Image (cartoon, rainbow, N blue to C red):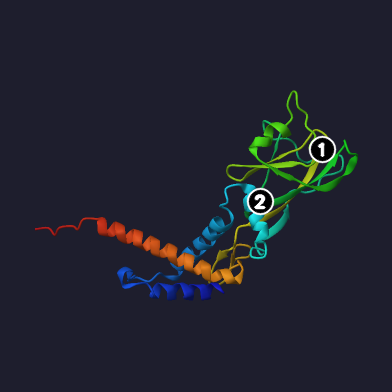
Amino acid sequence: MTVREMQIAFDMQIQLISKELEIVEKPDSYTILYFLNAAQDRYLRDMYLSKGRMRDNIEYIQQRSDVLRNLIVRENMLVEGTEDTSIISPTEVDGGIELDLPSNFLYYLQSFSKATNTLVGVTDPTWTPNRLVDHAEIDNITDAIFNKPILRKPCVLFEEGDKAILYKDMDTEIYNISYIYLRKPLKLVLENPVTDESVTECELDPYLHREIVELGTKMFIEEYKYRLGIQSSQPERQPQQ
C-alpha cells in the first residue's frame, strides 16, 4: 500500500467507529501520518524487539528476515587502516573499544572485524566474525593482572542506550568494523519524500500494511478516548451571576 492508500484505509476505519465513541472532528492528514509512523515503530518494537534477551530477538529477526528484508542492511563504519597501523585503540576503563553505530541503527544482528593476529600469523587485515557477549562474560574476555585471555573472535557487548563495546585479546589489532543490522524505517509521507529520510510507500512487507493501519487507528482511538476522559472529568464552569 502507498501511504496515500494507508491514509484512506485509516480514515475509513475511523468512519466505522461505534456511536458510543463517535469522533466529531476527523483527524487531518498530519495527525494520520503521525499515528501511522508511530504504529510502524511500535509494531517493530513489539513484534521483533521484545523477547527479553538480545540473542532471542536476533534469532527471531533472522527467522523473519523475508518480512524485514528492506530494513536489514550492511555498513562499514571505519575507513581501513594500513597493515602496520591499527586505527582502533581501547577507549573503555576495562580495555574495551567503544564503537560508533550507524545513524539509522535500530537493532544489532551481526558484525565483523577486519583484524590481524600475531598469535596465528595473520599479518594482513582479514575479516572475521565477532561474537556477541553479555555482561556475565566480561571477566573472561577482558585483560587483567592475572588474566590475559585468548579470544578466537573479537567480542561485542551492548549496554544501555545501544552503546556497543568491542573486546579483543592482546594479539589482535582491529582495522575496520562492518555491521549487519536492522535500520530504522523511513518516515511515511504523502508526497515529496526527502532522500534517505522518508518514503511514500511503507517499507515493511505488503501484507503487514493493513496491520500497521489497524494499529495506528487503535492508537488514535485510545488517545481520543483518553482526551475525552480528561475533558469529561473536568468540572463544568458555572456561569457568572
Residue 103 shows in this picture: no
Q: Amino acid at mark 1?
A: Thr
Q: Residue at x 42, y 70 (%)?
A: 28
Identify the mark at residue 172; answer none if there is no mark: 1
Q: What residue would you read off at disc 2?
A: 108
Crowding at dot 2, Cα within 10 Å, few <14 / some 14-19 / many 20+, comes out as many
Q: Is residue 39 above or below residue 88?
A: below
Which of the two discs, 2 and 1, labels the residue nearer the N terminus? 2
- Residue 10 position in % (x across, y down): 46, 72
214 vs 192, left or right, is left
Instruction: Pick the quarter of the image with the C terminus.
Output: bottom left
- State which quadrant residue 208 falls in: bottom right
Classify mark 1: helix, strand or loop: strand
**Mark pair 2, 1: CA separation:** 23 Å
Q: Residue at x 68, y 34 (%)?
A: 138
Q: Residue furthest top?
A: 145
Most foreground residue, 35 or 62: 62
Identify the mark at residue 5; answer none if there is no mark: none
Q: Is residue 60 above or below residue 32?
A: above
Q: Amino acid at mark 2?
A: Tyr
- Residue 29 position in % (x across, y down): 45, 70
Most foreground residue, 81 or 67: 67
- Residue 156 position in % (x across, y down): 70, 43
Instruction: Pick the quarter of the image with the N terminus.
Output: bottom right
148 vs 91, left or right, is right
- Residue 239 position in % (x across, y down): 14, 59
